Image (tube, rainbow, N blue to C red):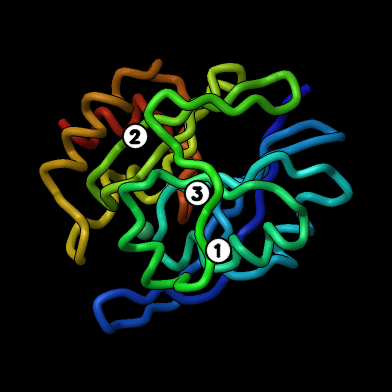
Amino acid sequence: MVRVDHAVSSGTFSLDGETFDVDNNIWVVGDDTECVVIDAPHSVGDIMAVVGGRTVKAILLTHAHDDHCRVAPALRERVGAPIMLHPDDRPLWELTHTDHLWDVDLADGFEVAVADGTLRAVHTPGHAPGAVCFHAPDLGCVFTGDTLFQGGPGATGRSFSDEDQIKKSIRARLLSLPGDTVVHTGHGDDTTIGAEQANLD
Ligand SMILES: [Zn+2]
């Protein structure tokens, strides 16, 4: 049975010449045999502690801010799984990784099968141009990266972000999911689509 496992990893986020301490969620979706990893923040060891002995089928990136993709190439080296990213995040990716690329371009509607479940990519530009959420209908949850948090939309104050666009993305693509869908965020606590509907109105 497909399930979600989770850990928190600490490190830094840098953009526009400033650096902040951040705690990132690591999400691993799978069963006892295989899994996919959502985001590769600060430490391969922190991720492997959640993965255990399972086969990693893919490294899915919600976006290419350095606190979400920094150890993706090192994790790929370790587990031999492809890195998947929406190509619109190339300018952000290149701020962190100049000598590696990702392997698979994510597009809206792209599906990744893992265990007896499926993750479906939902392109939600705004926090980043290539920001993607991963909806898992079998699990009744969605992994939103930095697009939607408990309390509202992700930050749009820095380069490559767009406030109007993130609100449009959330309304059109996330609030249309069932209200009891659990939202697993890139930082901090879970919420639900229904609770955030209220916060956006
Ligand atoms: Zn971000």
> Relative to residue 192, is residue 164 drawn left or right?
left
What is the crowding at mark 1: few (fewer than 14 residues within 10 Å), some, or many (at least 20)? many
Give me the C-alpha separation between circle 2 and circle 1. Answer: 20 Å
Q: Which residue position is annotated with label 1? A: 41
Residue type of the residue flagged with mark 2: His
Give me the C-alpha separation between circle 3 and circle 2. Answer: 12 Å
> Relative to residue 80, is residue 113 drawn left or right?
left
Q: Nearer the viewer, mark 2 or mark 1?
A: 2
Q: Which residue position is annotated with label 2? A: 123
- Residue 179 on image: x %, y %: 38, 19
> Relative to residue 155, is residue 132 drawn left or right?
right
Q: Which residue position is annotated with label 3? A: 61
- In which image quadrant can residue 46 be found? bottom right
- Residue 75 on image: x %, y %: 68, 61
Closer to the camera, 112 or 147?
Answer: 112
* Identity of the residue furthest to the left in this view: 164
Closer to the camera, 196 or 59?
Answer: 59
Q: Is residue 182 above or below residue 58?
A: above
Residue at the location (34% across, 53% down)? Answer: 89
